[in-house]
Image (tube, grey):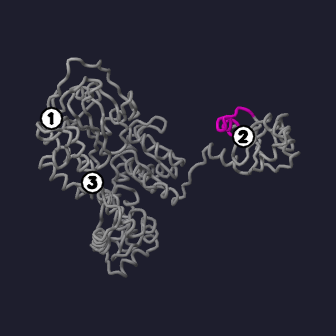
Amino acid sequence: MGGSGGAVKEVKSKQELDDLLRGGSPAILQFWATWCEASKQMDQLFSHLSTDFPHALFLRVEAEDQPEISEAFSVSAVPYFVFFKVDVLLAGSITSTSPTKPKMTTTTLPTCPNLWSATGGRKDGQEEVLGPRFKDSKVVDKLEGANPPSLANKVAKIAGSVNAAESAAPASLGMAAGPAVLETVKELSKENGASVAGNSVSGVSDSLNSRLQQLVNSHPVFLFMKGTPDQPRCGFSQKVVDILKDEGVEFGSFDILSDNEVREGMKKFSNWPTFPQLFCKGELLGGCDIAIAMHESGELKEVFRDHGVLALSGAPNSESEKKSEKSVGVTDPTGLSSALTSRLEALINANPVMLFMKGTPEQPRCGFSRKAVEIVQQEKVKFEAFDILSDEEVRQGLKVFSNWSSYPQLYIKGELIGGSDIMLEMQKSGELKRTLTEKGVVPEETLEDRLRNLISSTPVMLFMKGTPDAPRCGFSSKVVDALRQEDVAFGSFDILADDEVRQGLKTFSNWPTFPQLYYKSELIGGCDIVLELHKNGELKATLSE
């Protein structure tokens, strides 16, 4: 099978993908979602690239609709791209680098059956394989996120130049891409804050400082947020948008997810590490929590009034006006019944950390949900989950209630955080941990944490059966006597009183019996070792080094 001839093909099943990849052509697989704006932007470039590289296969998968394929490549966020080339080891030895018609020698190596893996990268012999391996094709590269120049460069490297007579080896964005691609890359790079040459600016240069100042002063009220007012991409941003709409003021906004240079620069410019950030007449008011507090106390309205920011005509200006509106039967803007609204609110607040997902934490039913579970578990916080596949009313109703069209959805103390892509981003930046802490959600103490804390609670620590005054086995009694004869102060823990500690410590210390004596968190040993040290006159010295 040849390339796509300038068309992007929608893949509907794992079997179809398998069949397409058997042909041996270079292939690029795009995972996307219709609700993701970044996916839509990158899809424009993907279509242009398919035109400029007609000898390669350009394949597209709706990530949430094809969980089997998404999980095979460990896809947890979109846009996501996987790059395939002809597998020399599986298909034979290639003597030509032309992407149009690889020449095969007469002797080929035995081919292998299709291999699918949900674990992502692995080692196959001495060669690193970045994902599932297919007959005649292998994964050679991946790209996560919206980076137009990087996508164009990676496509050029595996698909070769536009002119088939040119070698693919030196292919680069400028040499390999056609004019349609270059123009699209420039436009999308401008939108996404990426340079065609490569990485975004890390510091606040004079030009960036000037740009940020212009943005801050572009409107009397300006909001740096995740997403747009019509499509917020985190619960905190949505909350501030709702507050500003409730205040009835006109405001400008900037989507910091679309421009990483602005995003990182604003943290230093405002000396405020998180988003959203709300400004009034060029002055930072604060983030979501401050906006909520000021709004509820009436202070926000006063600040706006003092700075000459007036409410738009028709907006309710007082609590009495708002109550009056409600009293005359104004319809709930979501259109949901009061019973369903109450149920959704109860579910969202059922636990400080609540995850609405496909499947359960033990058996996730899509890659995005699996990734969300992993992220929450890595934060070591207690959470509850609701399987939206088990209740269609909740599944559809929550999309309207939260104004968030996909799953999973994570809530902290009743506030929407976002989906798996937002969660991953917040985790990488440390913002998720800060948010949990600010909301009073502290990490759970794991058994390992508990054991470490017990062991280090005193310099000399004895895990025994019973107590020093009432030992419940002869070995424990002998160790207590030895320590007392050496006049060593020690702490103790009765492992008969806590089976979790008793069983856990065996694994933790890799020592199957009790008692166990520790000094400065290091295991000394059991009864025999302690008695031997005591007999040789070395016990006190060992416990005082």
Give the structural element (helix, strand or loop) at label 1.
loop
- Compared with 378, 475 (above or below) is above
Gap between marks 1 and 3, in whole Å? 26 Å
Dot 3 amino acid type: Gly
Mark 2 or 3, nearer chain start: 3
Q: Is residue 241 left or right of residue 55?
A: right
Tell me if label 1 and label 2 are in contact, CB under 8 Å: no
Instruction: Please provide percent x and percent y for residue 66.
Output: 31, 35
Which of discs 1 and 3 lies nearer the camera? The answer is: 3
Q: Is residue 509 magenta?
A: yes
Gap between marks 1 and 2, in whole Å? 66 Å
Dot 2 amino acid type: Asp
Seen from the viewer's position, the closer of residues 328 and 534 is 534
Mark 1 or 2, nearer chain start: 1
Residue 99 sits in quarter: top left
Query: On the image, numbered disc 2 is attached to which residue?
Result: 498
Q: Is residue 130 left or right of residue 435?
A: left
Give the structural element (helix, strand or loop) at label 3.
loop
Tell me the magenta residue range.
500-513
